[in-house]
Each structure stands twice: as structure tokens, then as C-alpha cells.
Amino acid sequence: QVQLVESGGGLVRPGGSLRLSCAASGSIFSIGTMGWYRQAPGRERELVAMFNTYGRTNYADSAKGRFTISRDNAKNTMYLQMNSLKFEDTAVYYCNMWIGATMSGSDRWLEVWGQGTLVTVSS
């Protein structure tokens, strides 16, 4: 079974920082695209930052200059460093990966989502 486990959310004051982590586990032979998404109350889920197929980073305009996505391939882990947080960054943050895994003796690619971690920016 392949899963993503997120950590690092919490309550932070405006201007503060948080680092989110997303660790993949299972019989993984490769990971493709990786990204962070968020969903604020009453809004649709949106992309925050991602590594594309070529390993290059893409950021939402709202995240540029404040957030940094990174990865540790040896640990199958992805991070999101969030600085200068604003009220409007309050949301549930989800990680997403396309994972190549061996399941029941067969290699397959799966899109996997983390369970979500709540980030609350409040004074």
C-alpha cells in the first residue's frame, strides 16, 4: 500500500513561518510529479507549488517569493517552507504525488494524496 503522510501544520501569526512535510511510503520504485495544494473554506482546491515532470518548480502567484518547495529523494519526502504567512494562507494543505509502485507483483503508477494538514494564520 502506498501512502503519503503529512505533518507540520498548525497555528501561526501573520508574518510567521511553517514547514510542511510529506513522506511517501510503500513499495516505491519512482516518483514523478510532486506538489502542494490547498483548500480554504468555501473555495476550490488550488495548486500552491509543484515539481513538474522535468523536476522544475512551479509556484502559484500567491506563493512566489514566500514559499519554497523542496524534496529529499532519498527519503521520498517533499517539503513546503512557508514564510511571511498571511491571513489568506489559512487552508488545509494537501500533498500530491504520482508514484510508481509495485503492488501485487505488478508495477503501476498511482496518483496519491496526503490526508491534509491545517494551517491557520491568525493573530
Image (cartoon, rainbow, N blue to C red):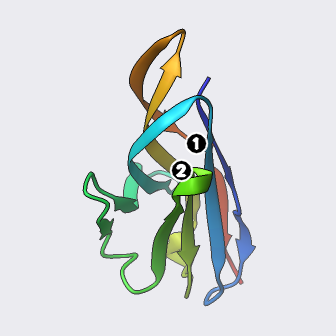
How many residues crowd around disc 1 within 10 Å: few (fewer than 14), some, or many (20 or more)? some
How many residues crowd around disc 2 within 10 Å: few (fewer than 14), some, or many (20 or more)? many
- Callout 2 secondary element: strand
For the residues marked 1 and 2, what is the alpha-carbon distance in whole angstroms?
6 Å
In the picture, which quadrant includes the N terminus? top right
**Residue 91 numbered mark, or none:** none
User: Residue at left 63%, top 49%?
Assistant: 23
User: Residue at left 42%, top 20%?
Assistant: 107
Q: Position of residue 14 (x, y in %)?
A: 63, 86
The quarter of the picture where residue 79 lies is: bottom right
Q: Which residue is mark 1?
A: 114
Please, is residue 40 above or below residue 116 in the view?
Answer: below
Relative to 8, is 88 on the left or the right?
Answer: left
Work out whether residue 15 or residue 53 is closer to the camera in this orientation and state it. 53
User: Residue at left 71%, top 78%?
Assistant: 12
Work out whether residue 56 or residue 82 is closer to the camera in this orientation and state it. 56
In the picture, which quadrant includes the C terminus? bottom right
Q: Position of residue 70 (x, y in %)?
A: 49, 68
User: Residue at left 63%, top 64%?
Assistant: 20
Amino acid carrying mark 2 in the image: Tyr
Relative to 10, is 51 on the left or the right?
Answer: left
- Callout 1 secondary element: loop
Please, is residue 100 above or below residue 31 in the view?
Answer: above
Amino acid carrying mark 1 in the image: Gly
**Residue 94 numbered mark, or none:** 2
Q: Which of the marked residues, 1 or 2, is nearer the chain's N terminus? A: 2
The reply to whether discs 1 and 2 touch (Cβ–Cβ < 8 Å) is yes
